[in-house]
Image (cartoon, grey):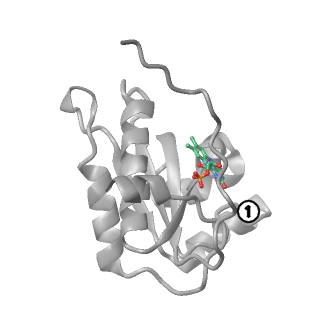
Amino acid sequence: MIDMILSRRSCRSYTEKKVSEDNLQTIVKCGVYAPSGMNSQGIQFCVITNEEILNALETKMGRSFFYHAPALIVAYCAPDYKYAQQDGSCAMTQMYLAAHALGLGCCWINQMKDMVDDPKFADLYQQLGLYHQCIVGALAVGYAKDEPKERIIHDNRVRFIK
Ligand SMILES: Cc1cc2nc3c(=O)[nH]c(=O)nc-3n(C[C@H](O)[C@H](O)[C@H](O)COP(=O)(O)O)c2cc1C
């Protein structure tokens, strides 16, 4: 587990190989099992593998904002959910690690959140059941094409008070 946490990276280029339904189920299950404030379990998940929809999202955006990954898992909740960011981030982290443990690459994609109020995307969001929802983040998932760049961890971020 510790090795998984320390070796996890974000992936920004993917092969065309599809991710199996089993693997996607496992990843999303790890999101579902994440801790939640007062055990409210308010985060929901939308797993998108439909090529037409994935292409439409990138085409409307005008760039490959999720790097042509073959799957996108959107973590979202009701707009008034109290622990949206906290619970959503826990779920996203667990899915990040699950994907890594399964030998898959993944990356947090913020733009799905930013586009939620853009009228240009209203029809697609309606189709996805995400219209007027609070989107915490989306996880692009696929098979990594390239090795990640060297990681630089900033120093002096930890203090022990003994
Ligand atoms: C809240 C949040 C939003 C992020 N949004 C994006 C994004 O929209 N696109 C992207 O390529 N990476 C995104 N990332 C990934 C970060 O850029 C990445 O975690 C950071 O550069 C450290 O690299 P690592 O994940 O390989 O350790 C996001 C990460 C977090 C936690």
Q: Could you tell me residue 100's position as x and y percent? A: 43, 65
Indicate yes or no: mark 1 CB to ligand 1 under 8 Å: no
Asked if residue 157 lies left or right of residue 119, the reply is left
In the current view of this chain or complex, which residue is farthest to the bottom? Answer: 17
Compared to residue 71, the image places residue 34 above or below, namely above
Residue located 69% across and 63% down the image: 149
> Residue 129 or 67: which is nearer the viewer?
67
Compared to residue 52, the image places residue 59 above or below, namely above
Disc 1 crowd rating (10 Å Cα; few below 14, some 14-19, many 20+) is: few
> Residue 67 or 116: which is nearer the viewer?
67
Asked if residue 141 lies left or right of residue 154, the reply is left
Residue located 43% across and 45% down the image: 76
In the current view of this chain or complex, which residue is farthest to the top? Answer: 162
Quarter holding residue 157: top right
Q: Indicate the quadrant containing the C terminus: top left, top right, bottom left or bottom right.
A: top left
Q: Could you tell me residue 59's position as x and y percent? A: 74, 68
Q: Indicate the quadrant containing the N terminus: top left, top right, bottom left or bottom right.
A: bottom left
Kindly identify which residue carries mark 1. Answer: 60
> Residue 52 or 152: which is nearer the viewer?
152
Q: Could you tell me residue 107's position as x and y percent? A: 56, 59
Amino acid identity at mark 1: Lys
In the current view of this chain or complex, which residue is farthest to the front? Answer: 162
Compared to residue 31, the image places residue 145 above or below, namely below
Residue located 37% across and 82% down the image: 20
Compared to residue 124, the image places residue 68 above or below, namely below
Residue located 34% across and 42% down the image: 43
Q: Could you tell me residue 121's position as x and y percent? A: 65, 54
Does residue 36 appear anywhere in the picture? yes
